[in-house]
Amino acid sequence: MDSLIAASARALAQGDALGALKRVALRDDPPALALRGIAMAQLGEHPRARELLRRAARGFGAHEELARARCIVAEAEVALAVRDIGSSPRALAAATVTLDAHGDRANAVQARLIAVRRLVLLGRLEQAEAALARLDARGLSPALAAVAALTAAELALRSLHIDAAHAALTRAQEAAMQSGVPALLAEVTETRSALARPAARRVSAGREQTLRLDQVAALLASEALVIDACRRGVAVGDGAGSGSGSAWKPLARRPVLFTLVRALAEAWPGDVDREALIARAFNTRRPDESHRARLRVEIGRLRALVATLAQIEATPRGFMLKPLDEREVVVLAPPIAGDQAALLALLADGEAWSTSSLALALGVSQRTLQRALAGLEAAGHVRAIGQARTRRWLSTPLAGGAGITTILLLPAALAMD
């Protein structure tokens, strides 16, 4: 390694992208191309960064597999930054094996953290938690330790483990301060600010209250019967503060049942008229006898599903929800209203997403996603940059800049009809 390459690498490690570029900007050999690519990524020029890193990987070729593996890891991180999560993770996994074989522990850990962060973005929290648990974070550099702690904090926030998130953020801040990298400190500050932002709305007996993440976790751990409209399910805690509910009935894949139970919960302690339930669940304004028959069938299915948590009783005009043990009924609604709340939640991170990555993260077809984006664009909630295959989608700034935490919407793909 010549002196200019070494000096450029040291500058990048300290977060000085411009200083790194000054030393290798006019060079086209593979090591210089790789460093230029990383520097451009730090400056936010992600398409150019990916191009340079790919050129560097081709330049190294199969005879320099360690350097090529490092380029693959760097490109994977750039892809994560631009939310290109639709590509196969096999190249990153193969690069990780190569790095391990050559004893490059730091870059191998970096590769594993990228894989974990991709799983978190896709909502595969159990897989992400298992992968993070296998990661050995001992003896890491301050910058890499900060990234590992930030990843742990993000996972804890998504899982509503607030104490664990606080502890991970404390570790991340200490490591970021030791690293002296301003971008890391800014990311820790931004993640910490999510704890103070509105995360959901509590609706009960006609009253509405905005909740922070810690308040959401406390509600899900309480004895209340919670109709969770953020993750589409029904939860009851044990009252002992044990986490996100000791009983959980997922309804994300049964939208009609969830619509019915939410309507009943919003009317609690009263009942809901049959015609209103039919209109809301089946999206019709002219119900006939077939709709009434279907309503009876769906109510029967819902009764069986929530039998251990609540009863659904018929009334002269409709149905009403009666929780067991005289529990309070609460609807936990998204902080952003509307059927496209999950889509807005993904875009709220400020990064530019492709339609393919958004569709993958939400578990919907690209055609469905494109219709949702068209509606949001017409309403002024999102904007597009680029054309054709390079088109990316961003959220528009929130009015007043108050900020909204949308973490609760990300672990599950919500239906967008």
Image (cartoon, rainbow, N blue to C red):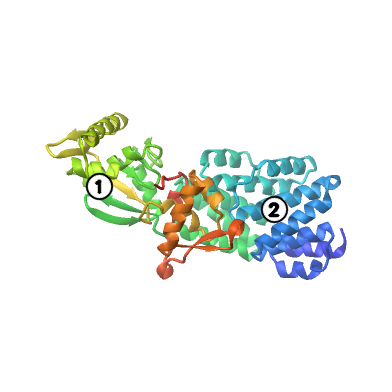
Tell me what residue is drawn at x 71 percent, y 50 percent. 73
Residue 263 percent location from the top left of the image? 26, 44
> Amino acid type of disc 1?
Glu
Residue 364 percent location from the top left of the image? 48, 44
Q: Is residue 46 above or below residue 132?
A: below
- The circle drawn on residue 212 is none
Tell me what residue is drawn at x 69 percent, y 44 percent. 92
Residue in front for this viewpoint, 379 or 16: 379
Residue 200 percent location from the top left of the image? 37, 53
Q: Which residue is mark 1?
A: 266
Lower position in the chain sequence, tag 2 or tag 1: 2
Q: Secondary structure at mark 1?
A: helix
Q: Which residue is mark 2?
A: 75
> Amino acid type of disc 2?
Glu
Q: Is residue 371 above or below residue 241?
A: below
Residue in front for this viewpoint, 172 or 108: 108
Whether residue 255 is visible, yes or no, is yes
Image side of residue 89 versus residue 317, left or right? right
Question: Looking at the rendering, which quadrant does residue 52 occupy?
Answer: bottom right
Q: Circle 2: is it few (<14), some (14-19), or many (20+) Cα within 10 Å?
A: many
